[in-house]
Image: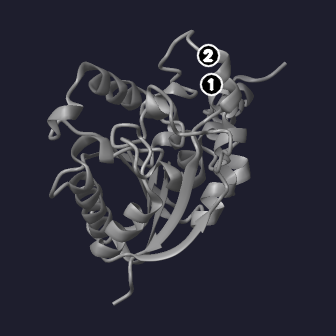
Amino acid sequence: MLTKFARLSLLLLASQVSFIASADISQALQHEVRSEANKVRDDARKPEQTLRFFGVTPQSTVVEIWPGAGWYTEVLAPLLAEQGKLYAAHFSDAFTLLSSNYMQSVRSDYSKKLASHPVYQNVTLTEFAPIADMTIAPPESADFVLSIRNQFYIFEGEQSLRHGLASFYRALKPGGVLGVVAPLLPEDKLETDWQGSGYVPKQLWLELAAEAGFHFEASSDLLHNPKDTADHPDGIWSLPPALAGGETDREKYLAIGEAHQMVLRFRKPVG
């Protein structure tokens, strides 16, 4: 029979398990904070390969742009918990389009997530909006800024992208990396009315990132989806997980899968 001291020791040990950080990305993907619903999307989103392409390590300081409900946070927080740092730059009321009840609700739920488990203790919640002068992290503090599955263009077009890139540049250390995952507009759709679709031309990202001072380093076809024709009635939101059309053509969109995405790596110059 366990003594009171032995029982206390076991309880302390159990609590310490919750604080254990993941030694690498593959271990972070198995952390207890990850929901089963999120794990199901790993095949489509390839988080391990994506983070390795960008170069993220357990020692990195990372800014996650618009983490939403925290799909990537559930991977990044365990990975960075012990030796790294995560800034979660969530929706901001400074951008009026983002002050909707939906956006406020998502941000509130995210804050509750951060309070729900000790592995999130090294996450600092900040704000981001694609407007001028947003501070997403202390200047030149980040090794990585990750903008994954965001659609800034739909707000104020190129100006939104310019403002976002300026914020990312300020937050990064010299030599730091901007990692972008964004819906890719096929070249044969350039002459269509794509501006509200969520898809964006790769060349636009390349040109505006260079204008902001970044050097383009590499791209990957890791998240290319040849089934995605990029001509859906509700843009990228026709596809899973949003399925904006409800039951209309639901099976069709499930068969297509998640949107065709570009994966781009940029670097802030040293000196």
* Mark 1 residue crowding within 10 angstroms, few (<14) / some (14–19) / many (20+): many
Query: Where's residue 191, x and y in %?
Result: 40, 50
Viewed as shown, does residue 169 lie left or right of 110? left
Residue 141 appears in the picture as rendered: no
Which quarter of the rendered picture does the N terminus lie within? top right
Q: Which residue is mark 1?
A: 253
- Is the residue 260 above or below the residue 174 in the image? above
Residue at (33% x, 25% y) in the render: 108
Q: Which mark is residue 250?
A: 2
Q: Looking at the picture, how far across and down is residue 41, in whole percent?
A: 66, 34
Q: Quadrant of the C terminus?
A: bottom left
The residue drawn where x is 47% and y is 57% is 180
Question: Callout 1: helix, strand or loop?
Answer: helix
- Tell me if label 2 and label 1 are in contact, CB under 8 Å: yes
Q: Which mark is residue 228?
A: none
Residue most extreme to the right: 1
Secondary structure of the residue carrying numbered label 2 = helix
Instruction: Name the spot of residue 267 as percent of width and height, x first.
Output: 44, 75
The kind of residue on which mark 2 rests is Arg
Q: CA distance from mark 2 to mark 1?
A: 5 Å
Which residue is rendered at x = 25% and y = 41% of the image?
A: 155
Quarter residue 51 falls in: bottom right
Please tell me whether residue 203 is drawn above or below residue 249 in the rendered image: below
Give coordinates of residue 204: x percent, y percent: 38, 62
Q: Quadrant of residue 252?
A: top right
Residue 30, image quadrant = top right
Residue under the point 51% across and 67% down: 265
